[in-house]
Amino acid sequence: MKRHTLRGLTGLALVALLLIGLIGCQGGGQTGAVVSEDPMEIARARGLSPADVVAAVKTYQPTGTYDEYIMFASGGHSGQVLVIGIPSMRLLKVIGVFTPEPWQGWGFSKETKEVLAQGNYDGKELTWGDVHHPALSETNGDYDGQFLFVNEKANSRVAVIDLRDFETKQIVKNPLSLSDHGGTFVTPNTEWVIEGGQYAAPFEGYAPLDQYKEKYRGLVTFWKFDRERGRIIPEQSFALELPPYWQDLCDAGKQVSEGWVFCNSFNTEMATGGVEKGNPPFEAGASQRDMDYLHLINLRKAAELVEAGRTRTIKGFKVLPLDVAAAEGVLYFVPEPKSPHGVDVSPDGNYLVVSGKLDPHATIYNFQKIQDAIANERFSGRDDYGVPILDFDAVVETQIELGLGPLHTQFDPNGYAYTSLFLESAVVRWTLGGPWAEKHGRDPWTVVDKVSVHYNIGHLAVAEGDNVNPDGRYLVAMNKWSVDRFANVGPLLPQNFQLVDIGNPNGPMQLLYDMPIALGEPHYAQIIKADKLQPWEVYPEVGWDPTTQSRHPAATRPGEERIERRGNTVEIWMTATRSHFTPEHVEVRKGDRVIWHITNIERARDATHGFALPGYNFNLSIEPGETATIEFVADRDGVFAFYCTEFCSALHLEMAGYFLVRP
Ligand code: K7E
Ligand code: CUA
């Protein structure tokens, strides 16, 4: 492994190095045990280069101190969301979203089962999700730290997470599709949560593939968000019908382009595959044309037309038809180099950066030029569905050669853009043009630095790097392959998040830290300044239902504990505190329906109690103040010792009781 040189040392770090006398040390890679309190000796013994020491000093977070940024990363196949501190790269939380999560009791209590069931497909329970793109809620285009949205590609679902307690509150299942990708993204004031499409299919039922052009459709769905209620309102949401091109990533316009939404597409060839029948495989069939279509969507106008009733209702959901959208100026296309992936809007809203997996360039579109071209009808034609196609040359600002396999772009406050290069396994820093170049006195649209990452980077996330007011400072490369970066753990390897210091606008980027992600393929992440988050320490009052964020009807205070029987139903109101449940004996008859509420009456921070009921497959996490419910039929007789699953106190093992089921 090649060691780094002194390239990239900041002044402060240099001082630190001088202090510990490390300049010139070339590491040998050995990592034996070190018995020394002398930093220089430790670094030498561990074979650390000066750059390694700088990286360590920049990322170390002493006990009791907090990270400056919090990253919300997709948990990929795990169906969850990861919460990670930056710069320490410590995992702070895994939020249960689309998949049951036992530690949190997510999907075990009656309350959370009901939230998960909102995402069922036609009554079928889905127990995993392919989580892709988290989106923090925004106010005036800036993250406000209130909510997080995330989509799930495999089944077209969107979840709402409340950042007062970092728990999932709602899952909506898209009634029209079973595949999405370009979500979630929010409009600058979070009025709409955007869920793009992916693999086209009929909105309803079955149609053979030879009717692809007529019967298959793409779509982008606009979910209306009610901030007061903290919920998506499906009845006020709608989908925009699109041609059966495979819509990919989207981004919301901001500042000058607020009110517009931009989505990429690929497979405008409308290839339908069938390699086994002698047809070209999808990968070839969908890459024949030189250009695909960037979709420009006037969301404001679309919402007006929906308001005016210009929709059709399909499966109970409002759809703005393609012909209406094309005729009324809601939808335009612009050619974009084939098989694009990311479309990213600059902080001022004027530049759209589109990167094609198969093209080493980023294509930069100018929103003002797009508006002029629309006003002057600078069309180069219409597609088969009547959608006007804007003249490429009229709307392109420039194309810039970035490297191999450019995918996604983010921004910093210094007029730089950062693009991930999948094929090259690198992050490239380049300058924005226009007012950005003027302000910072730089050559416009120019590559200035590149840093290697390991390996096959997909997304990258810059601190607040996709909102109107980027922070810069740190960048996380989200790498799909880790190959040789970690100890061999067998053929299935973790993904690799790499932290990169981008804080010095006049010096090179510096790789700081590798974090293995071992539960799925994360796609996107957003990084928010930690002080924008104000979560609760404990629930606001004893007897709280987190799924409704209000007092639970079965909230139980000390002294109110009881067991009541009504016919074959036994209902229990139980409390939990260090170190006992009240009551400790619950006896029912086999076949009884059991409704069992437990309230954690603690007000102390971190005084969480668990509740395990063996044999009946229950575990709950009952945080201070929370009330949770399990409901089941006591269909097995016997004696079941229930107990607390959190080591909550010295007498935690004694925090138990007996559930007796008489035959
Ligand atoms: Cu992986 Cu945004 Cu789903 Cu690109 S996406 S990498
Ligand atoms: Cu409560 Cu252990």
Image (cartoon, helix red, strand yellow):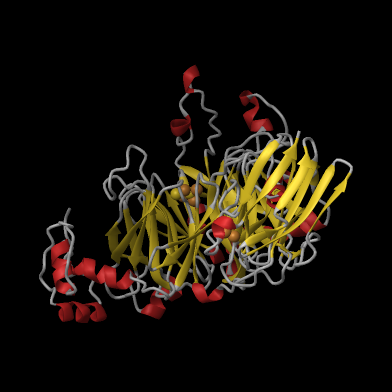
- Residue 448 lies, in percent from the top left, at 29, 66
- Residue 77 lies, in percent from the top left, at 51, 44
Tell me if I can see residue 375 in this picture.
no
Count numbered badges in the picture. 0
Question: Which residue appears at 77% of the width and 59% of the height?
Answer: 304
* Image quadrant containing the C terminus: top right
Tell me if I can see residue 650 in this picture.
yes
Q: Determine the image quadrant of residue 56.
A: bottom left
- Residue 167 lies, in percent from the top left, at 62, 59
Question: Which residue appears at 77% of the width and 62% of the height?
Answer: 552
- Residue 221 lies, in percent from the top left, at 67, 50
The outermost residue toward the right is 567
In the rendered image, the vertical position of residue 439 relative to residue 585, given as above or below: below
**Depth order, front residue of 241/269:** 241
Q: Is residue 609 left or right of residue 29?
A: right
In the rendered image, the vertical position of residue 339 relative to residue 40, given as above or below: above
**Depth order, front residue of 457/629:** 629
Question: Which residue appears at 23% of the width and 74% of the height?
Answer: 9
Q: Determine the image quadrant of residue 4.
A: bottom left
Question: Which residue appears at 39% of the width and 44% of the height?
Answer: 358
